[in-house]
Image (cartoon, helix red, strand yellow):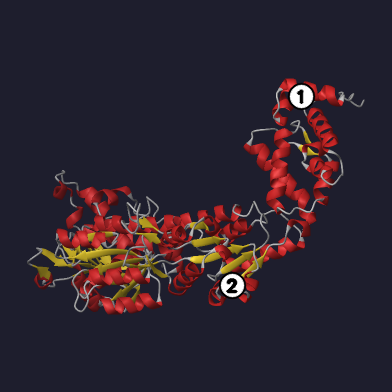
C-alpha cells in the first residue's frame, strides 16, 4: 500500500505526458509522490440521459470505493461533462477532509465558449482545478484571496484569474493538515 | 465571517442534501441537513441557523408552510426556497411570506454562490449595524439626567437594573423632578430601544379622548371619527408606553387599562377585531397612589399590576449638591440653543440658587437659568438676573406706594435706565414712566468704580 502517495486515475484517455505533467504539479504542491493509474471503467452507468451529463456524486462514490484505501488521496480525471443533482454542472468536486475527488476537463475547453482551442491554457486550468479539489481533501475551504488556487471558481474566467499556488494562509493550513 | 454563519439544508432527496452539504462545507460554512420540515423545525427549536435552504415540495409539510413556522421561531433567519417546479405563484407567495429568495433546481453554480454570498453579506451587515447601534446608544440617552448626589446615583442604579427587564415601573416624584427623563432613560437602555417610546399625558385628556388615544378607533366609531386610527398601545408595539399622570385616569379607564396590561390585547373603539401588542408600561405620578388606593380613588389590582418596580425621584431641595452641575448643564444647553457665547454665573447668584427651596424642582431651576440668560448681560448670570428679588419683597409690609417705587427703580436699574425697554417691561408708555420717575424722585445710581 502507498499511504504516502497520491493516486491520479485517468478516466478520459489523457495523453501520458499530460498525466505526467499533472502528477509533477501535484507533487510540487502537496509534497507527496504520485502514482498514475488508467481506469477502463464503463462510464455509461454514470450517464444521465435526461441531463446528458455524468453524475459527479456517483463518480465520486465510485472513486472513493475503488481507490481511496490504498493511497493517502485519489483524484479521478475526466473528459466528460459532470453534474450533481442540484447544479447545472460542476468542474470538479471532492470529499472535504476525505480522500477522493473528481475533476473534469469538459467545461475548461475554450471551444465550448466560442474561442480558439488553446491546449496550454487548458492544461493550466485543469492543473489548477486538480490542485483545488485535492486541497479540499486536505481540509482547505474556499479562499477569498484572488490569486489563491483555493478561490472558488465556477466560470473559466475565475479559473484563469487565480494562480496554481496556495496563498500563505492556505499553505500554512495545508502544512498543519498533513502536507507531505 | 463565513466560518461563523450556520446553514441548514432541508430537502427530502439525499443526493440534493449531500451535494449542497459538500458545496457549502467547501465554502467554509457550518452546514447541517434535515430530511423533512419536521426535523428542520426541531433543529431550529434547539439551535440557531442563519440561512435555511428549503425545498418547496416535501412530504408532510411543504417548504412554504415550513417557512412560515421558521419565521415564528426566528424572524431574523434568511430562508431561500428551492424547487424543481418553478411557478410564478409559488415564487410570489414565498417572497410575500418574507423569503429572502427563490431558486429553481438545478442552479447555475455561479448563481448559487452569489445568492449565498449576498445572504452572508446581509447577515454580516446586520451584525455590524447592531454593533454600531449599541455603540451609539451607549454614548447618549441619559445626558439630560444630571447629578452626582447619593440620591440621584441611587435612582440611576435603579434605572440600570430595571432597564433590562420587562416589568412595569411607576416613577413617583414631585412635579418638575424629571419623571419623563427617567422613563426615557429606562427605555433607551432596554432591549426595546429601537422601537418607539410613546408618551401619553393622561391628565390632559378627557375620558373619551383618552380611550380613543390609547386604543385607537375605527372609522365612524363616533362623530368626527372619519378614518381608522391606531391607538398608542398599538403604536408602542415592541417598545414602551409612558403614561404620565396616571393618577388622573377615571375608574372606567382604570378597568380598561388593567385588562390590557394583563392580556396585551385590546379592541379599537368601535371595532371588533382583537389587536395584540407587545409593549412595556412605565407610569408616572406626583401623587401618593397607595394613599389613593386606601381612599378608594385608585384600583388596588391596577396599582399592584403597575407597581412592580417603584422609582422615587427626590425633590431638588434634597439634592442641593447637584445644583451647580445642573446650572452648568442648563447654561450650556440654552447658550447653545440660542447661539450665544457661554456665560458664567457669579458666586452670589449661585449661592442664592442653592438656598432656594424649589417648589417647581428642576423645571423651575431650568426656567430660572433660561430667563437669566435671556435678560442678562451676555457674559455672566448676576443675582439681579434671577427672579428672587421680587419674591423677597413680597415678605415685606411695604405700602403699595413703596412697592411701586421699588419695583420701578429695580427695572430701571436692570435695564441701565433705558426708558423705552423699562417702559415695555412695566407695560406703561414712556410718558407715564417719566411721570412716575418724577413722582418718586428716582435717580440713576452712579456705577461703582
Asked if B331 appears above or below A164 in the picture, the reply is above
Q: Nearer the viewer, residue A56 or B101?
A: B101
Classify residue B308 as left or right of residue B374. Answer: left
SS under mark 1: helix
Query: Residue A104: percent from the left, percent from the top?
Result: 20, 61
Instruction: Give the CA distance from mark 1 to mark 2.
Output: 58 Å
Q: Quadrant of the N terminus of chain B?
A: bottom left
One can see residue B439 in this view:
yes
Asked if B64 appears above or below A121 in the picture, the reply is below
Query: Residue B185: percent from the left, percent from the top?
Result: 59, 58
SS under mark 2: loop
Mark number displayed over residue A101: none
Q: Chain of mark 1?
A: B
Residues tagged by mark 1 and mark 2 found on one chain of the structure: yes
| Residue shown at 72% from the left, 36% from the top | B373
Corner quadrant of residue B186: bottom right
| Residue shown at 85% from the left, 35% from the top | B402
Mark number displayed over residue B307: 2
The residue that disc 1 covers is B433
Q: Residues within 10 Å of mark 1 (few under 14, many from 20)?
A: many
Corner quadrant of residue B38: bottom left
The furthest residue to the left: A49
Mark 1 or 2, nearer chain start: 2
Q: Chain of mark 2?
A: B
Query: Residue A62: percent from the left, percent from the top?
Result: 20, 75
Q: Residues within 10 Å of mark 2 (few under 14, many from 20)?
A: some
**Image label count:** 2
Classify residue A52 as left or right of residue B442. Answer: left
Classify residue B198 as left or right of residue B402. Answer: left
Amino acid at each position: 500500500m502507498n499511504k504516502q502517495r497520491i493516486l491520479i486515475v485517468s478516466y478520459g484517455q489523457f495523453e501520458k505526458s499530460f498525466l505526467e505533467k499533472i502528477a509533477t504539479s501535484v507533487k510540487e504542491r502537496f509534497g507527496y509522490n504520485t502514482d498514475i493509474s488508467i481506469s477502463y471503467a464503463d462510464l455509461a452507468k454514470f450517464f444521465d440521459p435526461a441531463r446528458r451529463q455524468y453524475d459527479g456524486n456517483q463518480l465520486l462514490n465510485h472513486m472513493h470505493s475503488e481507490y481511496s484505501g490504498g493511497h493517502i488521496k485519489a483524484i479521478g480525471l475526466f473528459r466528460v461533462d459532470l453534474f450533481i443533482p442540484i447544479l447545472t454542472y460542476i468542474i470538479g468536486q471532492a470529499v472535504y477532509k476525505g480522500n477522493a475527488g473528481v475533476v473534469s476537463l469538459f467545461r475548461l475547453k475554450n471551444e465550448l465558449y466560442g474561442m480558439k482551442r488553446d491546449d496550454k491554457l487548458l492544461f493550466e486550468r485543469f492543473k489548477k482545478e486538480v490542485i483545488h479539489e485535492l486541497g479540499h481533501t486536505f481540509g482547505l475551504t474556499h479562499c477569498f484571496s484572488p490569486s489563491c488556487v483555493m478561490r472558488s471558481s465556477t466560470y473559466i474566467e475565475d479559473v484563469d484569474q487565480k494562480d496554481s499556488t496556495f496563498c500563505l494562509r492556505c499553505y500554512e493550513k495545508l502544512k498543519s493538515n498533513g502536507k507531505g | 465571517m463565513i466560518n461563523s454563519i450556520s446553514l441548514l439544508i432541508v430537502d427530502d432527496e439525499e443526493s440534493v442534501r449531500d451535494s449542497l452539504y459538500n458545496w457549502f462545507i467547501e465554502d467554509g460554512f457550518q452546514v447541517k441537513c434535515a430530511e423533512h420540515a419536521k426535523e428542520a423545525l426541531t433543529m431550529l427549536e434547539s439551535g440557531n441557523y442563519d440561512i435555511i435552504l428549503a425545498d418547496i415540495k416535501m412530504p408532510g409539510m411543504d417548504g412554504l408552510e415550513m417557512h412560515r413556522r421558521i419565521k415564528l421561531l426566528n424572524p431574523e433567519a434568511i430562508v431561500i426556497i428551492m424547487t424543481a417546479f418553478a411557478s410564478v405563484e409559488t415564487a410570489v407567495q414565498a417572497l410575500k411570506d418574507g423569503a429572502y429568495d427563490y431558486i429553481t433546481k438545478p442552479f447555475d453554480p455561479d448563481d448559487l454562490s452569489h445568492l449565498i454570498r449576498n445572504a452572508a453579506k446581509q447577515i454580516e451587515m446586520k451584525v455590524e449595524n447592531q454593533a454600531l447601534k449599541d455603540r451609539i446608544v451607549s454614548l447618549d440617552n441619559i445626558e439630560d439626567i444630571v447629578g452626582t448626589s447619593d440620591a440621584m446615583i441611587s435612582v440611576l442604579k435603579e434605572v440600570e437594573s430595571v432597564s433590562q427587564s420587562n416589568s412595569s415601573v411607576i416613577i413617583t416624584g414631585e412635579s418638575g423632578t424629571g419623571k419623563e427623563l427617567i422613563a426615557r432613560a429606562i427605555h433607551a437602555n432596554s432591549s426595546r430601544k429601537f422601537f418607539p417610546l410613546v408618551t401619553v399625558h393622561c391628565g390632559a385628556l378627557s375620558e373619551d379622548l383618552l380611550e380613543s388615544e390609547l386604543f385607537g378607533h375605527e372609522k365612524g366609531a363616533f362623530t368626527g371619527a372619519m378614518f381608522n386610527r391606531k391607538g398608542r398601545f398599538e403604536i408602542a408595539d415592541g417598545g414602551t408606553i409612558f403614561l404620565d399622570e396616571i393618577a388622573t385616569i377615571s375608574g372606567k379607564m382604570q378597568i380598561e387599562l388593567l385588562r390590557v396590561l394583563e392580556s396585551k390585547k385590546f379592541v379599537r373603539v368601535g371595532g371588533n377585531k382583537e389587536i395584540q401588542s407587545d409593549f412595556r408600561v412605565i407610569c408616572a405620578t406626583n401623587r401618593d397612589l397607595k394613599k389613593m388606593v386606601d381612599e378608594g380613588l385608585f384600583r388596588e389590582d391596577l396599582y399592584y399590576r403597575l407597581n412592580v418596580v417603584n422609582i422615587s425621584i427626590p425633590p431638588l431641595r434634597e439634592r442641593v449638591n447637584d445644583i451647580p452641575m445642573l446650572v452648568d448643564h442648563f447654561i450650556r444647553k440654552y447658550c447653545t440653543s440660542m447661539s450665544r457665547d457661554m456665560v458664567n454665573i457669579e458666586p452670589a447668584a449661585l449661592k442664592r440658587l442653592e438656598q432656594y427651596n424649589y417648589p417647581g424642582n428642576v423645571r423651575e431651576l431650568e426656567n430660572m437659568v433660561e430667563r437669566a440668560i435671556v435678560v442678562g448681560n451676555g457674559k455672566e448670570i448676576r443675582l439681579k438676573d434671577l427672579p428672587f428679588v421680587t419674591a423677597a419683597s413680597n415678605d415685606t409690609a411695604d405700602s403699595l406706594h413703596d412697592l411701586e417705587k421699588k419695583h420701578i427703580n429695580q427695572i430701571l436699574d436692570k435695564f441701565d435706565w433705558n426708558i423705552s425697554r423699562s417702559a415695555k417691561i412695566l407695560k406703561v408708555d414712556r410718558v407715564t414712566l417719566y411721570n412716575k420717575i418724577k413722582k418718586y424722585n428716582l435717580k440713576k445710581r452712579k456705577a461703582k468704580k
